Amino acid sequence: MFIKKFLYINIIIASSFINYLSCDSNPIAPEFYNDGSFYYYFDEKIKIYPSNSVMSVKFRDNLSPLEVNNLLEDYHLEFYSKLYPEEINIDTLINNNEIIVVKLNDRRNTVKNFNTRYPKVNFSATRFGNIPEVKYCLPSYSTDGSDKDSKRIFITEDLRFKFLSDSNQVEDILQRYNLNLIPREYLGEYVYLCEVTEYSPKDPLNTANELQEETNILWATPDFYFFFRP
């Protein structure tokens, strides 16, 4: 991934680190709200707080910077540049088909009206997160409710889960949740990497939470990522 060269660290199975970041002692900042969101750290529910204004977007391949910037302007969104090193600009991210963090600059609206709804096939193609040009638009979260960027985490459409033991139920899981299996040479024993699809009934976070509650699955988690700059 291009951004890795610039200390943008994509954390795979980052639950233990995010658990370390989490803290309930701070009051919730105005940007965030408590809607009961959580992820599982094994069997423990860890609270996270969605942002009212910041989200991550993955556009479809082959969109030009002009097309993307026009879409952002039409939907009153702007590039959230403060998370990135100065040498990274939005055109570079677009040309490399990277995830882009954006911020809603219209105070009359909230990200609830922008994020991708699942199953995608059931929702209007005029909603930003469901328009044909957007692969997904997903919320950012704070691990402790504060507005510190070091506490901000994001998810993608990918998720991972680990069976308790060798299992022949992988195909059943993929079909029930409408997931695509992403082949990898080795992820760990009984570990599988998948992505939600346009037919998946729920978003990646809630899909992972439901998988966690399956009796034959040890853990399930979305792929969390965050930005780190010294």
Image (tube, rainbow, N blue to C red):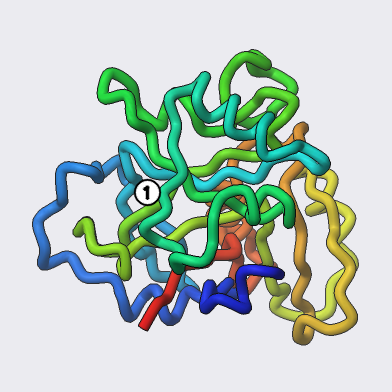
Q: Quadrant of residue 187?
A: bottom right
Q: Quadrant of residue 77?
A: top left
Given residues 32 and 77, the one toward you in this image is 77
Percent from the top left, x then y, of residue 179? 79, 48
- Residue 13 visible to an observer of this rendering: no
Q: Number of marks in the image?
A: 1
- Residue 58 visible to an observer of this rendering: yes
**Which amino acid does the dot numbered 1 rest on?**
Ser
The quadrant of the rendering that contains the C terminus is bottom left
Local crowd size for mark 1, using a 10 Å CA cut-off: few (<14), some (14–19), many (≥20): some
Q: Is residue 115 above or below residue 217?
A: above
Residue, x 33% and y 21% (percent of image)? 109
Percent from the top left, x then y, of residue 212? 58, 62
Residue, x 84% and y 62% (percent of image)? 182
Percent from the top left, x then y, of residue 8? 53, 72
Q: Is residue 126 left or right of residue 79?
A: right
Q: Quadrant of residue 150?
A: bottom left
- Please give the residue where the numbered disc 1 appears in the rendered image: 37
Helix, strand or loop under label 1: loop
Residue, x 32% and y 45% (percent of image)? 36
Q: Is residue 67 above or below residue 49?
A: above
Q: Is residue 36 above or below residue 211?
A: above
Percent from the top left, x then y, of residue 70? 59, 26
Residue, x 69% and y 73% (percent of image)? 162
